[in-house]
Amino acid sequence: MTARTLFGLTRFAAALLCAVSLVHRLFWGLSSQTIAGQNFFAYLTIQSNIAFVAVALTGGIVALRRPEDPGWLTGIRTIVLSWTITAGLVFALLVWQAGLRGIPMTVPWSDHVLHFALPALTIVGWIVGPGRRAARWSLIPGVLAFPVVWGLFTMWRGSRIGWYPYYFLDLRQVSGIPEFLATVAFALAVFAGVAAALIALSRWRQTAPAT
């Protein structure tokens, strides 16, 4: 078995683990019978992990059929991994903030997998996985496009139903517009920073076979 084949199989395994964790998280949330549990698909972290499943499956198929990833797959991986890694960082920050605010926050095993284990494994795979060429710096705006559109829609939806997936999007839970804008700017900066780090790593160490 070649390293490329093994890497393709690990992509399938990552997709399966993510899918199982998503299903567990869905039913765990529904069992709480809260508005948060009923709005499972409203979370950016959930949406980004659904995209991760699709990309991991696609990447696994490509890895079994080709010696290297095509440029379009490297681009999509850069974008989606930026979302999932940032989601893990933001989730860790939310857990920390909840503790500071004295708000109890239960974290099931599926959240640990989705927000901590899988992002860590994907970073390792990004660095050492065979068949990856350098990603383009021009992908950073694409990374930012989704959270911006998601945020605008979420703000509109939240104003209609009175619920937001993350507290900092609710102006009632922050000190005012300055804190809201600062938090949003920080979140977008993290997205851009993670994307820049992935791109820099891909340029520092290309793992596609020499041509």
Image (cartoon, rainbow, N blue to C red):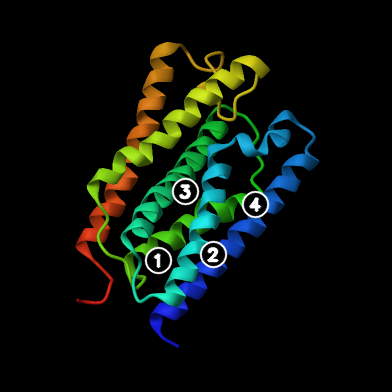
Q: Identify the secondary structure beneath mark 2.
A: helix
Q: Residues within 10 Å of mark 4 (few under 14, many from 20)?
A: many
Q: Amino acid at mark 1?
A: Gly
Q: Earlier in the sequence, mark 2 or mark 1?
A: 2
Q: Identify the secondary structure beneath mark 1.
A: helix
How far apart in space, not on screen, are marks 2 and 1 (Cα)?
10 Å
The image shows residue 44 at horizontal and vertical percentages of 53, 38
Q: Residue at horizontal 26%, vertical 76%? A: 209
The dot on residue 84 is: 3
Q: Earlier in the sequence, mark 4 or mark 1?
A: 4
How far apart in space, not on screen, are marks 4 and 2 (Cα)?
12 Å
Disc 3 vs disc 1: Cβ atoms closer than 8 Å?
no
Q: Earlier in the sequence, mark 3 or mark 4?
A: 4
- Image height check: is 99 above or below 28? above
- Which residue matches tag 2? 14
How far apart in space, not on screen, are marks 4 and 1 (Cα)?
21 Å
Q: Residue at horizontal 51%, vertical 32%? A: 97
- Image height check: is 83 above or below 118? above
Examine the image and state in which quarter residue 210 appears. bottom left
- Which residue matches tag 4? 22
